[in-house]
């Protein structure tokens, strides 16, 4: 999958297509949108279709860089500055530790005030401001909602696609929040983007070319000098990792598949320390929509 890797990868289950249509309908009744992204891959975890829908509906868009505790602080700050320069409201949070949640609350309150002002201008009664939370799978939307909501009311899980139903949740300050299922893109453009989404768990593992993804990940981490296993031999990076970690089959053959699972698990759990897979300087700018 490396030499002959196709330019795009398609994986768009029926429930995701339905979810995208539902979000488009929900935008008619909400005032504010939270687009949740993974701070380790801000470029790949943005959803251009959702952004376009929100802009078309003229909805205030808050860009939430979640899992900031797993990302490199300087890299995250650069993404924050770039997103702000593009006219968005960025905020970095770590749902597991609660960092940044107070700042997010403040932004939601500001958006609430804008919704009230808009209601007054159009001579409508200012009801509760309605907030839509959306994003790709496994970026931590449900965990974020549990942080924001009293007593946590959203189901959470490590597998992408766990949120299928729709639920309104009441927040303090006269705000109602609507959850939504994770929606991927109909087409994932490029092998690099596919690898990044796979590494953070946005694509179900059973749908992955596991060895190719993990080999590419190991090569990236070695280039960044995060993975110190020496130079790869004929068995590639995974073979080198397997030998270094003592992952051997009968006859001393490296257990490539075990090494592949290890690379993904270790990266997702932050065992290498803060790690940002996508940095602002790697391209001139993040995609604008």
Image (cartoon, rainbow, N blue to C red):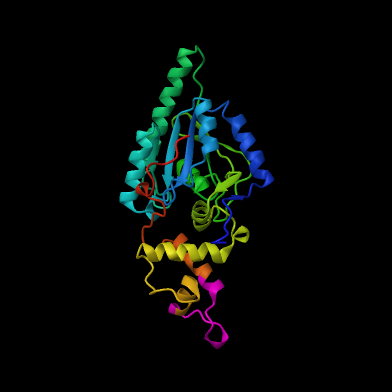
Look at the image and say whether residue 252 sits in the magenta stretch: yes
> How far from the left and from the top, in percent, is residue 283?
39, 46
| Residue 272 seen anywhere in this rendered image of the structure | no
Look at the image and say whether residue 257 sits in the magenta stretch: yes
- In this rendered view, identify the residue nearer to me: 157 or 199: 199
- From which residue to which does the magenta span run? 244-259
User: Count the marks: how many?
Assistant: 0
> How far from the left and from the top, in percent, is residue 49?
55, 36
Residue 258 found in image quarter:
bottom right
Viewed as shown, does residue 101 lie left or right of 213?
left
Outermost residue toward the right in this view: 14
> How far from the left and from the top, in percent, is residue 288?
45, 36
Viewed as shown, does residue 44 lie left or right of 225?
right
213 relative to 53, above or below = below
139 relative to 289, above or below = below
Task: Tell me which residue sits at (51%, 22%) in the image.
Answer: 127
Viewed as shown, does residue 223 lie left or right of 152?
left
Task: Tell me which residue sits at (49%, 19%) in the image.
Answer: 126
> How far from the left and from the top, in percent, is residue 273?
36, 61
Residue 109 found in image quarter:
top left
Outermost residue toward the left in this view: 74
Outermost residue toward the bottom in this view: 251
- In this rendered view, identify the residue nearer to me: 218 or 28: 218
Outermost residue toward the front in this view: 3
| Residue 282 seen anywhere in this rendered image of the structure | yes
234 relative to 128, above or below = below
259 relative to 31, above or below = below
Quadrant in which the N terminus is drawn: bottom right
């Amino acid at each position: 999958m490396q030499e002959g890797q196709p330019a795009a990868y398609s994986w768009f289950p029926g429930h995701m297509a339905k979810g995208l249509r539902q979000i488009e309908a929900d935008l008619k009744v909400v005032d504010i949108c939270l687009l949740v992204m993974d701070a380790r891959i801000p470029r790949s975890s943005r959803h251009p279709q959702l952004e376009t829908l929100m802009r078309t509906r003229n909805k205030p868009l808050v860009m939430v860089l979640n899992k900031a505790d797993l990302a490199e602080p300087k890299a995250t700050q650069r993404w924050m500055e770039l997103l702000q320069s593009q006219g968005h409201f960025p905020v970095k949070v770590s749902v597991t530790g609660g960092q940044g949640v107070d700042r997010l609350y403040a932004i939601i309150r500001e958006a609430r005030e804008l919704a009230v002002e808009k209601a007054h201008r159009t001579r409508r009664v200012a009801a509760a401001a309605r907030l839509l939370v959306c994003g790709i799978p496994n970026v931590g939307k449900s965990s974020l909602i549990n942080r924001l909501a009293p007593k946590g009311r959203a189901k959470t899980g490590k597998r992408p696609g766990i949120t299928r139903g729709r639920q309104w949740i009441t927040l303090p300050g006269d705000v109602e929040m609507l959850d939504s299922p994770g929606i991927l893109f109909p087409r994932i453009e490029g092998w690099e983007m596919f690898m990044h989404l796979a590494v953070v768990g946005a694509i179900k593992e059973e749908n992955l070319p596991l060895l190719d993804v993990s080999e590419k990940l190991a090569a990236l981490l070695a280039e960044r000098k995060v993975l110190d296993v020496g130079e790869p031999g004929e068995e590639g990076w995974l073979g080198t990792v397997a030998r270094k970690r003592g992952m051997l089959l009968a006859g001393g053959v490296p257990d490539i598949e075990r090494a592949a699972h290890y690379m993904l698990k270790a990266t997702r759990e932050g065992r290498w320390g803060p790690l940002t897979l996508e940095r602002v300087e790697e391209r001139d700018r993040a995609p604008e929509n």
